[in-house]
Each structure stands twice: as C-alpha cells, then as structure tokens.
Image: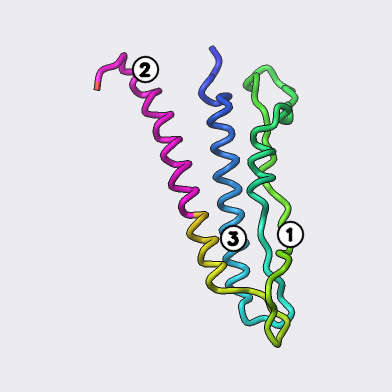
Amino acid sequence: MTMEILTDPTIQAVGAYMSRLSQRQQIVASNLANIDTPDYKTKDISFHATMQELLADNPLELRKTSPEHLEGWTAIPMQAQPFEEQGLISGNDRNNVDLDNEMLKLSETSFGYAMISQILKGKFRILATSINEGRG
C-alpha cells in the first residue's frame, strides 16, 4: 500500500511554499535587525521565481536505495537564493532598509501563510471526509 497523501503534488508544493514563506520572514527579520547598520543592503527572495520552481514539470526525483523507502517521492528545492533589492533610496549611512517596506513584506508573508494554511486545511478536510465515508 502506498502513502498517496505523502506524494500528492499539492501537499509537496504547500510544504515547499511554507518553507519559502519562513525563509522570507527570516530575511525580513534580518533586514529589520540591521535597520541602523551602516552600508547594509536590503535583501529579499523572488516569489515569482518560487512559484515557477514549484509549478515546474520536472521536480527532482529521489533515488530509492532501500526497499523500505516510499516510492514516488520527489524533492522540491526548499531554499531560494536571497538577492539585494535594487533601486531603494539609501540614507547618509548608505543603508537602504525602509521600515514601511519591510512591514509590508511581513504582512504579505503573513497573508501568504494564512492562505496556504487554508488550502492545506481544505485538503485534509477532504481526506477526513473520505475516511469517515461522508459522515460528519
């Protein structure tokens, strides 16, 4: 018997997306922690590239090295490469962290987490309904 829920592409994409949201939150927290650091440059990750990666037709195939391993698992890269944001205004100390911009990024990240959590919750609700044969 295979564990199809674990190989479901939606579940894998949701997990990878949540990892990216966590990574973005860490980057924004680092930006905020360095708001007064001279020469610090604001960093971020590209969510457009993230979605392209997650929706790609060719996820990385994992090699089964033991009969006990689950078949059909794929790996989606969990870490995106941070980049320095361009075109931001720097202060006298050449630091370009903008508090309002970083707070907006935190709000976007929080919204993304809430949205993807609801998708995951719906997916498991369908599974629970199936297990209970449609009974509440």
* Residue at mark 1: 83
User: Amino acid type of disc 2?
Assistant: Ser
Q: Is residue 116 magenta?
A: yes
Tell me the SS state at disc 1: strand
User: Amino acid type of disc 1?
Assistant: Phe
Q: Residues within 10 Å of mark 2 (few under 14, many from 20)?
A: few
Quadrant hosting residue 70: top right
- Spot the residue most to the top: 1
In the image, the segment drawn in magenta is 110-135
Q: Position of residue 104 (x, y in %)?
A: 52, 63
* Residue at mark 2: 130
Taking the spot 65% from the left edge, 20% from the top edge, the residue there is 72
Q: Alpha carbon of mark 1 to alpha carbon of mark 2: how far? A: 44 Å
* Residue at mark 3: 26
User: Amino acid type of disc 3?
Assistant: Gln
Taking the spot 65% from the left edge, 36% from the top edge, the residue there is 54
Q: Residues within 10 Å of mark 1 (few under 14, many from 20)?
A: few
Q: Is residue 16 magenta?
A: no
